[in-house]
Image (tube, helix red, strand yellow):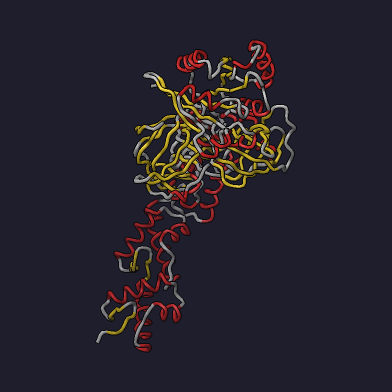
Amino acid sequence: MQYFLLGTCGHVDHGKSALIKALTGFDGDTSIHERMRGITIDLSFTSLKTSKRTLGFIDVPGHKNLVSTMIGGSFGLDATLLVIDAFEGLKEQSFEHALVLSLLQIPCLIILSKADKCPDIKAQKQAIIEALKPYSLCILGVLACSIYNPESIQTLKDFLLQYPFSKRQTNQDLNHLFRLYIDRVFTVQGRGVAVSGTVLGGCIKQGDKITIAPLSKEVSVKTLHQHGEEVKQAHIHERVALHLQNIEATELQEGMLLTLKGYLRGFDSIDVELHTYDNPALKHNQHITLQIGTLKLQARVLILQYPYATLICSQKIFACYLDLIIISINQRVWGAALVLNPITDLLKKPIKLALLKALSCKDLAQSFNILTKAHKKGFGLLSSMQRFACTTHKALEIANTLPDVLVDSQECVLYAPSTLKNVIHTLLNIYKNNPQALLSAKSLNSKHNYISPYLATLAFKVLEQRGQLQEEKGLWFLKGLVLEKLQDKLQDKLYQLIAQAKFSPQAPYNLYDLLDIDRRVGDLALKTLCQQRKVIRLCHNVFVQKEALEEMVCLMRDLLNTHRSLDIHLLKENLSLSRKYCIAYLEYFDHLGYTHNQNGQRTLKS
């Protein structure tokens, strides 16, 4: 069944709620305050159903002091009914709502309500269309109707049920990522916590696990409800209420984003392109209000070069590339910000401007080039869904077309040729300072985590082609040396380092880094030393020279004879050892069978 989400908007008291009631039989003004005041204060929801199509309606308030509520209800709409009193014509909120629809690029059907009161409908139609021309609205049609004329209501209903609406989608990949901004939080007796909102992307199903982005908390979806009925799933631009597990109602609030785990990160600084209609340009350091979905926050504008700017936000925002954010000043809509760079980058201004211009033109290839050159230690693509509104796979496809970029498809990282030169320089320094180094791509990655195994392998092969290195069994060493002799010398060096440290030897992996050796080679050398009983393993990461351990046992026996009991505190105080080593030595002492251990206190056995 087709599902389209429509909104009704327009100036206060122009008949939006009455029109929805005439279409659906539902009175949207349900709260006591709304009925007393005769206007819609909050978003209200209803639907119109046939066997082939469901139309969900969001009736947004028309009062100028409630424009943020109108904006919050508009982000997920497929189309709107812009309701204009045929007798009064366009009013202040008619224009402001038209501006929001234009900024969010929402198609609209103009409804001339209260047509029975207008003496010249044809002239009013022409006047309204002319007045709205500067907003560049996508107008689906203009219909006149009156709630007192059943035939006109039926004509409107037939139009809505038959018009070939389409889902308003900006990007195919991002539309598959589930996102929903909470507009209501409530508790259902016997069922627990529930939230409602409009699905802005992707699909949500019963039993799914989702993340409350600002809380970094994962919750489960128990059930879904849509227009009073339980459903198994909800799709993009559909209203839905979710019953959630593992969360309290007090933890949730309007404007929080629900999404899938691992896709979005929050930043309090984003780069945007500013858009407005017939409003003065924003000033550097000007304070503004932002709204995306039902999330409303304060921000400060840093003008880079008009229309490009950085927004410093009062809280973290989980925006995506090409998201639209409505900007208001003193509760009046100024315009919108098109998100170009949702992830904070420490870039110099000329580089950032070049990047924003490329992103504005949707030139991802050029954007990748700029970012790869700017990130000297590699530019990652794992955040491509948020950063470029595309999958990592698609980002890699684009990257592989770039002539001057090294693409690590395994780690999803792009490197500039200059980065490879730096890695080669690093390797040359290692082998210069330690001619007996035995490295692998993995061990180089352990020493310098920005050097992926892919990049390390490229660097090793360049040096092999130059005749400076050779490879055997996955190990790289200087040309002309013999692997077996290097491994023999390695055991002696490893033993010397352990012996020199005496009672506090470093962990094996730290020793391997000092010796510039691969961990597998180091583990093998250490295992051989243990088999030869030159080194004793006390615990996972503590290996001690045999003679040093025998000396430590004598020292502990002397302390025990002097103090009659031995514990960690006494050992630390007398031998200046860390807690890790004290525990290892005391447990070894227990293993020798000399002591009783009662709650950490060791005493000699009788």
Q: Which residue is drawn at 34% across and 66% down?
A: 539
The spot of residue 584 in percent (x, y) is 36, 71
Dividing the picture into quadrants, the one containing residue 375 is top right
> Taking the image as drawn, is residue 396 in sight?
no
Could you tell whether 88 is left or right of 599 in the image?
right
In what quadrant of the picture does the N terminus appear?
top left
At x 69% / y 19%, what residue is drawn? 131
Nearest the eye: 120 or 604:
120
Asked which quadrant contains residue 272, the reply is top right
**Does residue 62 sit above or below 550 in this rendering?**
above
As drawn, which residue projects farthest toward the bottom?
A: 562
Closer to us: 85 or 335: 85
Q: Quadrant of the C terminus?
A: bottom left
Whole-percent x and y of residue 380?
51, 40
Using residue 605 as the reference point, say whether residue 343 is left or right of it: right
Q: For this view, does 229 lie left or right of residue 97?
A: left
| Residue 445 x, y percent position in the rendering | 47, 48
**Residue 204 can be seen in this image:** yes
Residue 282 x/y as whole percent: 72, 36
Q: Is residue 291 above or below residue 168?
A: below
Residue at the image point whose x is 41% and y is 52% from the top: 518
Camera-nearest residue between 112 and 126: 112
